[in-house]
Amino acid sequence: MGLDFLEQFYEKYHITDGTQVVISLVFIFLVAFLLTRITKKLKLPNVTAYIFAGILIGPYVLNLVPQADSETGAHAILDNMSFITDVGLGFIAFASGRYFNLKMIRRNGWKPAIIALIQAFVTSVVVFFVLLPFNLPAPIVLVIASIGGTTSSASTLMTIREYHCEGEFVDYAIELDAIDDVFGLLSFSVCSGIALGIMTAQNGGANFSQWETIWLPIIVNAGIVVLGFLVGWFMAKVAISPTRSKDNRLILMVAAILFLVGICGLAKVINKNILASPLLCVMVMAATYLNFTNDDEMFSQVADFSAPIILLFFVLSGMNFKISYMVTVGVIGVVYFFARLIMKYVGNFLGGLATKSPATITKYIGLTMEPQAGISIGLAALALNMFTADPSLNLSQYGEEINAIIIFSGILYEIAGPALAKLSLKLSGVLKEENRTKVKKGSELPMVISTESSLRDFVEIKAPTPEMIRKLNNLNKMKEQCDVMDRYVHTKAYTQEDTTPSSKT
């Protein structure tokens, strides 16, 4: 079904790999953009469009982006773009760290952490036993169950912003999502290490070693998390200087994210079977930076910069989705979808009862944790890379099956997630339709809250008058000056002789 003539064209005219990459990127961005026009009409997140775009242009449908030939290794465009997975995970983790505010955690105490732990454990255990009867090895089911405990907060956060929701229920929802991701990442790191060790031993690899399979990965990941904290503290000292321009602050933060992603990749030097996920350490770095600086603007800058990278990440995940697995994986995917859907609610309900939380939180908070796309698909991509790293072990099939199950169910969750998130906010009483930003009929300058990014929203102004453009430009200049003042008063980078921020800018 693929467009094989494209590969033949590359071979016939000896098109260089660099040119092939550029052409492939054009196809990726163009098809992804066109599909977002459809998902926007259907009120679906852009993540859904990106995944479908990857499936459509991938090697199993149109084959617009050539992959490596099994014999000659030619046209390794798709394989050579695999680094986007780790980089994309780094930026997704940075965005998640934005909501890990210690002030909120102190205000709510330990209850959200206990609820998150109970629901993650209950969900993973039930998913494991529900999927165990299917024709999958127990270690692979263990990896899938660990991914089932994670939550994607994007849909819930977008709904909260759109309706200007606030209050205790909203604080719990944000904190639960953040803590749940930490538990999920820790669980995945341990379970995937155990699964890889067992499967390696069963397929003729090295014998199972408890130290190398369980304890060494835990120690390495713990060390990388500490490094993430140190990098976040260092960035809080360096990036906030009043003499630092916005562009340079962004460059420094992107460099910090890529540094941690690279360190996670280098962890395999210690042991090739160690899976050091950039998700956890970058999330810690982002949370540390936020709590030391309260610099929310940095996260908006990084979100703008990373939008194309996030798009590439989800499109590449879609490309790795094997259509041939739809018959068997489709059934498992549906079972996984409903098992996790039910147990996420039940687990949060039990957690609410155990912590004696308010009735609205006990009854409805579970619905805010149903969406699952961003981090879960990232973990599935990590599992795919982990099981395909050593071709001699013949474990690639299991990585592909994990990836297919999570992507299949992730699409379903992206369809149902926003509606469930809105329902939970409405039932809890924090969502009121009249709070939604509305466009007045006949208004010359409507302002619309748009959801054009998978990580953040922005305000789009349509049909502006020349006078309004001038006023907006003046407002932007005033905002930049306020940002400089804010950065100035939060730093000690001034002297007794020169204490005015205007002379430093």
Image: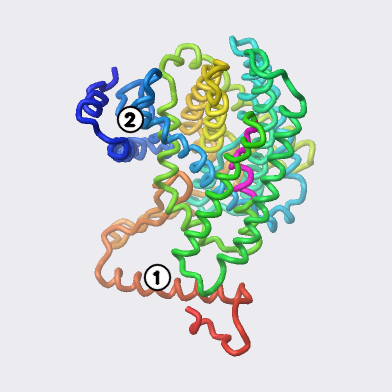
Colour scheme of this structure image? rainbow
From this viewpoint, is residue 401 visible?
A: yes
Say whether residue 411 is left or right of residue 174. left
- The residue that label 1 is drawn on is 476
The image shows residue 59 at horizontal and vertical percentages of 35, 23
Cα–Cα span, label 2 and label 1: 41 Å
Name the amino acid, label 1: Asn
Q: Main secondary structure of the magenta part?
A: helix
Res. 363 image quadrant: top right
Front-lying residue, 315 or 67: 67
**Splitting the image into 4 quarters, where does residue 106 fall?**
bottom right
Looking at the image, is 322 positioned above or below residue 286? above
What are the residue bounds of the magenta stretch? Answer: 274-284
Q: Position of residue 504 (x, y in %)?
A: 50, 80
Say few, some or many: other residues with alpha carbon within 10 Å of mark 2 (under 14 / 14 to 19 / 20 or more). Answer: many
Amino acid, disc 2: Val
Q: Residue at x 51, y 54 (%)?
A: 255
Q: Name the residue tied to disc 2.
A: 65
Who is closer to the viewer here, 112 or 306? Answer: 306
Crowd rating for badge 1 (residues with CA inside 10 Å; few <14, some 14–19, many 20+): few
Tell me the SS state at disc 1.
helix
